[in-house]
Image (cartoon, rainbow, N blue to C red):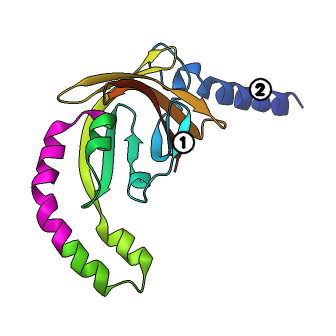
């Protein structure tokens, strides 16, 4: 009986010694696993509290957060206006590149759209293209502030998690046509 108790005690000691508080990720002074790690797709955009319908391509916008790095992908159709994209991340270079090709793409899209009205899903998939892909580093600065460091700019976002950490949103103040507005971007875990 003493042997069984001793073996049981040793086994429990080994199990408890293997569990350490330092096993969690420590980021920004927090000893909790980061809720932001994972893949997130844009599911809603609100301007001053009013939600607008997103195109299928806009719904493809994706953040992929790893332990230190992230990838941000923005999609567009060749006929989409690039004004909304410049409000989102301020990447003027990608807007200039895509606008050079827009005239020639529009003509070819019109021809293919007339010929293939049979299957709308194929049209949507074929016309949705990657507009920008940015790589960056991220860090949790505490108090729900995440710093995203791209090669050309550093952004800080106050990120709010909802629905048991399955959605998050951040807000940006932008000026459109001389009017200041608050835009909220809502992302859902994939």
What range of the chain is rendered magenta? 89-107
Considering only vertical position in the picture, is 95 above or below 79? Answer: above
Secondary structure of the residue carrying numbered label 2: helix
* Residue 126 painted magenta: no
Residue at the extreme right = 1
Kindly identify the residue that appears in the image at 32 percent across and 48 percent down: 74
Q: Residue at x 25, y 47 (%)?
A: 82
In this view, the mark in front (1 or 2): 1
Can you say whether 118 is above or below 37 in the image?
below
Q: Secondary structure at mark 1?
A: strand
> Could you tell me how many numbered marks the image carries?
2
Q: In the drawing, what numbered circle is on residue 51?
A: 1
Position of residue 90 measured from the top left corner of the image (x, y, whole percent): 25, 33
Asked where in the image residue 160 lies, by quadrant, the reply is top right
Left or right, 115 with respect to 42, comes to left
The dot on residue 104 is none
Q: Residues within 10 Å of mark 2 (few under 14, many from 20)?
A: few
Q: Position of residue 128 (x, y in %)?
A: 32, 63
Q: Is residue 154 above or below residue 131?
A: above
Q: Earlier in the sequence, mark 1 or mark 2?
A: 2
Assign the magenta stretch its main secondary structure.
helix
At horizontal 34% and vertical 37% (from top left) the residue drawn is: 70
Q: Image quadrant of residue 168?
A: top right
Q: Nearer the viewer, residue 183 or 149?
A: 183
Q: Is residue 102 magenta?
A: yes
Disc 1/disc 2 C-alpha distance (Å)? 59 Å
Report x, y in % for residue 175. Answer: 33, 26
Q: Which residue is mark 2?
A: 9
Q: Is residue 93 left or right of residue 112?
A: left
Residue 89, x across and y down, in percent:
29, 34
């Amino acid at each position: 009986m003493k042997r069984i108790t001793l073996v049981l005690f040793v086994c429990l000691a080994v199990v408890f010694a293997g569990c350490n508080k330092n096993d969690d990720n420590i980021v920004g002074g927090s000893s909790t696993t980061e809720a932001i790690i994972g893949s997130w797709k844009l599911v809603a955009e609100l301007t001053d509290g009013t939600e607008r319908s997103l195109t299928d391509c806009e719904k493809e916008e994706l953040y992929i957060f790893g332990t230190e790095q992230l990838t941000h992908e923005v999609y567009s159709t060749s006929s989409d206006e690039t004004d909304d994209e410049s409000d989102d991340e301020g990447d003027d270079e990608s807007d200039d590149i895509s606008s050079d090709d827009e005239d020639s793409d529009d003509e070819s899209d019109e021809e293919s759209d007339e010929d293939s009205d049979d299957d709308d899903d194929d049209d949507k998939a074929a016309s949705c293209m990657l507009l920008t892909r940015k790589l960056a580093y991220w860090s949790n600065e505490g108090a729900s502030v995440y710093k995203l460091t791209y090669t050309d700019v550093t952004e800080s976002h106050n990120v709010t998690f909802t629905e048991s950490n399955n959605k998050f949103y951040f807000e940006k103040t932008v000026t459109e046509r001389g009017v200041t507005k608050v835009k909220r971007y809502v992302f859902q875990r994939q």
